[in-house]
Amino acid sequence: MVSKRLSRLEGHRRKFMAVIDGTPECEKAVHYAGRRAKNSNGGLVLLFVIPEGDFQQWLGVEQIMRAEAREEADAVMAKAAQKVRETIGIDPEIVIREGNASEQIIQLVDEDRDIAVLVLAAGSTKEGPGPLVSAVAAFPIPVTVLPDTLTAEEIDALA
């Protein structure tokens, strides 16, 4: 059960969230979420989840691997945030977590009660639309799913 959203109360603003996962479609989700945030005077939250289970090594090796994964996540998020600043003109919030992506999305939504919409974009691979799009029913807030066929101009027109 999701906690009550605060985004409509005084002193709060509605936030759109997009997940950065390195897929081509995540760029579309970020673009749409950023445009919606800007057009509605809202905020944009970008989430990167470092997959769990990648660090099952000896303690010293595990610590190095975690540090390297965190450095890579920081670099990816810095690049994504800069692109949002340059193309949309807003400053996104950056969140980096470790674990299962669906679980981390649900946890972040529960913690930040201003997040009101999750934006995902469907993939066009033979494996299907992607694991997060396939798990839409699990998320406790509305989810906007963009078709893979939309161009940047069409996204701008819809946002």
Image (tube, rainbow, N blue to C red):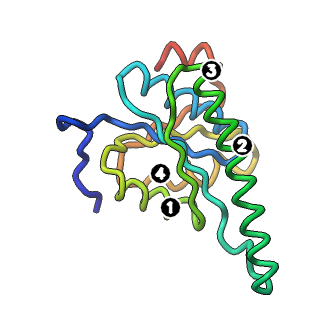
Nearer to me, 111 or 123:
111
Kindly indicate the quadrant of the structure image that contains residue 31: top right
The residue where tag 4 is placed is 136
Q: Is residue 128 above or below residue 147?
A: below
Marks 2 and 3 sit apart, C-alpha to C-alpha, by 20 Å
Nearer to me, 29 or 99:
99
Find numbered disc 2 in the image and state the secondary structure of the residue it sits on. Answer: loop
Circles 4 and 2, Cβ within 8 Å, touching? The answer is no
In primary-sequence order, the first of circles 2 and 3 is 2
Q: Residue furthest bottom?
A: 58
The residue where tag 2 is placed is 23
The residue where tag 1 is placed is 104
* Three-letter code for the amino acid on which mark 4 is drawn: Val
* Three-letter code for the amino acid on which mark 1 is drawn: Gln
In primary-sequence order, the first of circles 2 and 1 is 2
Give the left or right position of residue 95, taking residue 51 as reference.
Answer: left
Marks 4 and 1 sit apart, C-alpha to C-alpha, by 14 Å
Quadrant containing the N terminus is bottom left
Q: Is residue 43 above or below residue 54?
A: above
In primary-sequence order, the first of circles 4 and 1 is 1
Between label 2 and label 1, give the one nearer the viewer: 1
Marks 4 and 2 sit apart, C-alpha to C-alpha, by 17 Å
- Going 72% across and 43% down the picture, which residue do you hit? 23
Circles 2 and 1, Cβ within 8 Å, touching? The answer is no
The residue where tag 3 is placed is 86
